Structure formats: C-alpha cells, structure tokens
Image (spheres, rainbow, N blue to C red):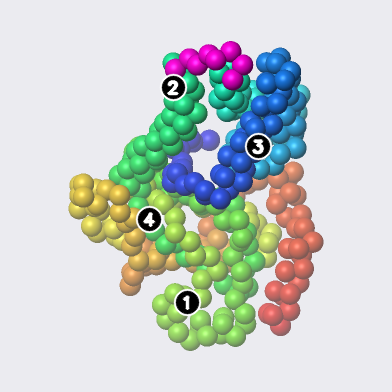
Amino acid sequence: MKRYKLYKKAEPVCCNFEELLSHIILPLVIASYASYPFLYFLGLESALVYNSILAVIATYFFDGLKKFIPILNDRDTTGFKSVFYSFVSFLIILSSLLITGFGFYLLVLYQKNNEFNIFHFYLWLLILFGFPLFYYAFRSVRYYYIKKQQDEHFVNIVLVINHDLDLFLAIDNIQFVNTANRNSSDIKITNNIQSYSQKEFIALKTKTRHYYVNKEGFRETVQIPFNANAFLLSWFSYTENKYYAVEFPFPFEKFIAEQETCSTDKFKIFRARETEPLYLHLYLNGGIRFFYKNAILVDIPVNNESAVNGKDKKDFFDLNATIKESYIKYNRNLR
C-alpha cells in the first residue's frame, strides 16, 4: 500500500481561562494552602506524603485534568503501557504540586528560622510562571510554523458529495493526492450521505446539474494538496452489494487557475484560500462525475467492482440495526 503524507490540521493555541482557573489554578492553590499546616507543624516529610497521596487521587479520579494532560486520556491501554502512562501522569501532577507548594516551604523557613534565600525564591517564580509562558509561546510558534507550511502546500476546497435516490452507499476512503511530493488530503466522512426524497429526485430530473448546489448530501471544507494529480475513492454500494475502489487522474489546474499566483504571494501566506465548491456525484455501477463551476471535470459512467476478501465483505455488508432501519425507510420512499 502506498504511503502518503496526510494533511494534519494545525490547532490554534487557545486557552479557556474559566476552565484553566477551575481545573488547574484553583485546585493547585487550594492544595498548596492545605499543605501549609503539614509543613509548619509536621515537617517536610509529611508534606511530601500528603502531596503524593493527592497526586494519586488526582491521577485516577480528577477528570478536569484530562483536557490539559493528554496522557491521562489513554485509559484504553492495558499491561505495561497502562502502568507507564499512569506513572508518568502521577509524576506530572506530583511535580506540579511540589513546585506550587515550594513557595509555602520558603515561607515556613522564613517564619521558623528567619531564613530567606533570594535565589531560591526567584528560581521558584521563574519555574512557576516562566515555564507555562514558555510552553504557550512554544506552542504558538509551532502552530504558526505548521500553518505556514500547510498554506504553502494545501488549498481549501468546499467539497460537496451527492448520489442518486436509488443508490444507498457508504464512503470508505476519499483522497486527493499529489504523487510528486506524496502530499495527501485527510478527509473523514463520519456521517455518510443522506438520500434525497422522491420529490427532490423528480425535481433533479427536470432541472440542470446546478440544482445540486442546494441539495448536498455532504458538504464540508477540505484541504487538498496543490497540484493534486490523482484522486482515490472507495465506497460500499449496499444497493448493489458491491465495493468500488477507483484511482484516476485529477485535473487540478482546471479549477485552480490562479494556483501559480497563490503559491508565490507571500503576503497571502496565512490567508485561507478558498474556491467555489467542487461537486462529486456518485451513480449506480460505480459511476463518478465531478463538477466545478460550469465545467464537468471528470465523467466516468462505469467502474468495475473491486476485489475484497470474504471476511471483509461480510463485515462491510453486515449492516447494523440503524443502517437497516434507514435502508427500509429509504426503500419505502422509492415505491
């Protein structure tokens, strides 16, 4: 199987202050204040035991940390990996508690022994406030770098997919590929295409293909590589009990006439480049047709069924109860 460099969406660095306050800042402040009596009356060892117990509890029972510490979300792992993730999570939480509580340790030393180490105090402030700021700055720089790279190699396209009323299908894979640099789109269709009603289908017969514009089954902005020259598509046709997998040349230049200007315009590097929607229509017998503006880019009326092993085919067409119910309703509309 060919390996391609899939598009990965760059997520901007955003911080919900309310969530940060309720899930991180307030719990750390409360835990630090609670450690003060242990430090003052029972000593450093008791405070370490207190923070260790608190870290264990937070690792397994405090769900608020999961959003800010991704490793806490890996609960589906088993064996050594699960133990390792739990141990790393424990160390992260314990370190945060100890760093936050170190300020109270300095306060206790000053109150009891009249000792104040200015170097330790400033080092504590640097770690407590400097590390989060450094981490935020690093994530921001990384985001803009990745975004710049993506804007240089990918273009935003509104992809619209439709199919005929008498075709019940589920898309398995869809990719736009630049075979020269192996860049590829990463399109995920979680909710597969809905069927038209019979009334809409009759209307489609009497009007032009431009009627599709307001009757999409799937519509989403996707990212395709610049100069993409190949298109990969596979889908299950439940109506025909067939699986199709096709690969054919994609005429990128026909609907991105300004591609050379966009790729060299440094002042537009961070702008979202969008064009008019690209329409894909699927037919019985594996038929495919691409529309863009007023032109038909690709028109393949028939494709052969692709080979698939028995087990996979059984899995593909062993419809669950929800799909079966939808299919029954769909057949009723055809009558």
Q: Position of residue 248 (x, y in %)?
A: 43, 51
SS of the residue at dot 2? helix
Q: Which mark is residue 214?
A: 1
Which badge, 1 or 4, comes first in the chain's sequence?
A: 4
User: Which residue bears the numbered disc 3?
Assistant: 30
- How many numbered circles does the render carry? 4
Picture residue at 55% right of the left edge, 15% below the top:
114
Is 286 situated above or below 13?
below
Q: CA distance from mark 2 to mark 4?
A: 48 Å
User: Which residue bears the numbered disc 2?
Assistant: 122
Residue bounds of the magenta highlight? 111-118
Picture residue at 47% right of the left edge, 21% below the top:
121
User: Which residue bears the numbered disc 4?
Assistant: 156
Whether tag 2 and tag 1 are in contact, CB under 8 A, the answer is no
Res 50 quadrant in image: top right
> The residue under label 3 is which amino acid type?
Ile
- Mark 4 Cα within 10 Å, few/some/many (few <14, many 20+)? some
Q: Nearer the viewer, mark 4 or mark 3?
A: 3
Q: CA distance from mark 3 to mark 2?
A: 22 Å
